[in-house]
Image: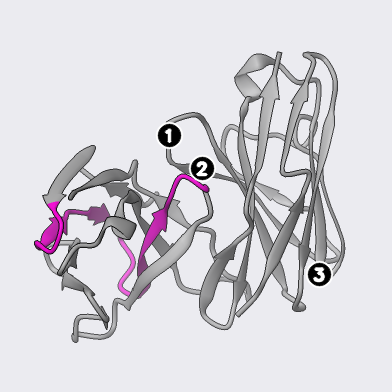
Amino acid sequence: SAVISQKPSRDICQRGTSLTIQCQVDSQVTMMFWYRQQPGQSLTLIATANQGSEATYESGFVIDKFPISRPNLTFSTLTVSNMSPEDSSIYLCSVHYSYEQYFGPGTRLTVT
Amino acid sequence: AQTVTQSQPEMSVQEAETVTLSCTYDTSESDYYLFWYKQPPSRQMILVIRQEAYKQQNATENRFSVNFQKAAKSFSLKISDSQLGDAAMYFCAYRGLYSGGGADGLTFGKGTHLIIQP
């Protein structure tokens, strides 16, 4: 299995600021995924991050708002830029490993 | 685009009884994966069961089993002998096969909140 950690686990931020979320995996993986879970909602894929290439964003998500880095095969960051209260969500990192999809514990973001 | 529909926002079952959660999906692909995930209040996503579309046999994991009807695009989860620890949000999810050497992300349904009555 793959064990995923995320930092921070939660944060409260002011509107207009940015927050960078870190995702660390204990195994080397080709692709990492970032999801958003708005309050009381399901998970929505934000983007897919391949090591060494630009992230691929889903419809409705743009790089300027959610820049992603993927410097190596075990680490990725997601930045939520110029935050507004609508960005208050849980952000989850996920990896595909050995035919399974594993999820990190999530980062609960509250924007005031 | 693929869609996943869970028509039951909430289900309630007595402890030790059996409950079935419904899921339908829409896809034009012939090969894909289907999943059921459990999300307790801790918000950690826990894989309950996985089904490969090319397998006719329904997947089973202890008290959890699925009824996979490929032609009907239906993928229900049956929980037998329900336990208090089964209380959680349950999400049905779809993933296509590898494309371009990588793996697609998951498409999730809206979830079913399962309540276990003691």
Q: Amino acid at mark 3?
A: Thr
Q: Secondary structure at mark 2?
A: strand
Marks 1 and 2: in contact by CB < 8 Å? yes
Residue at coordinates 17% horizontally, 44% vertically from top-left? B11
Q: Does residue B118 appear left or right of residue B49 in this picture?
A: left
Circle on res. B4: none
Residue at coordinates 17% horizontally, 61% vertically from top-left? B74
The image shows residue B16 at horizontal and vertical percentages of 13, 64
Q: Which chain does tag 3 point to?
A: A
Circle on res. A74: 3
Residue that carries the numbered disc 1 in the rendered image: A41
First of labels 1, 3 by sequence position: 1
Query: Is residue A51 one of those drawn in magenta?
Result: no
Q: CA distance from mark 1 to mark 3?
A: 28 Å
Q: Which chain does tag 1 point to?
A: A
Q: Residues within 10 Å of mark 1 (few under 14, many from 20)?
A: few
Q: Does residue A32 appear left or right of residue B60 in this picture?
A: right
Residue B27 seen from this side: no
- In the figure, residue B59 lies in which quadrant? bottom left
Q: Does residue A26 appear left or right of residue B94 in this picture?
A: right
Residue at coordinates 85% horizontally, 20% vertically from top-left? A17
Residue at coordinates 25% horizontally, 81% vertically from top-left? B60
> In the orientation shown, which residue stands out farthest toward the front?
B118
Residue that carries the numbered disc 2 in the rendered image: A44
Nearer mark to the viewer, of 2 and 1: 1
The residue nearer to you, when weighing A74 against B29, is A74
Q: Amino acid at mark 2?
A: Thr
Q: Amino acid at mark 1?
A: Gln
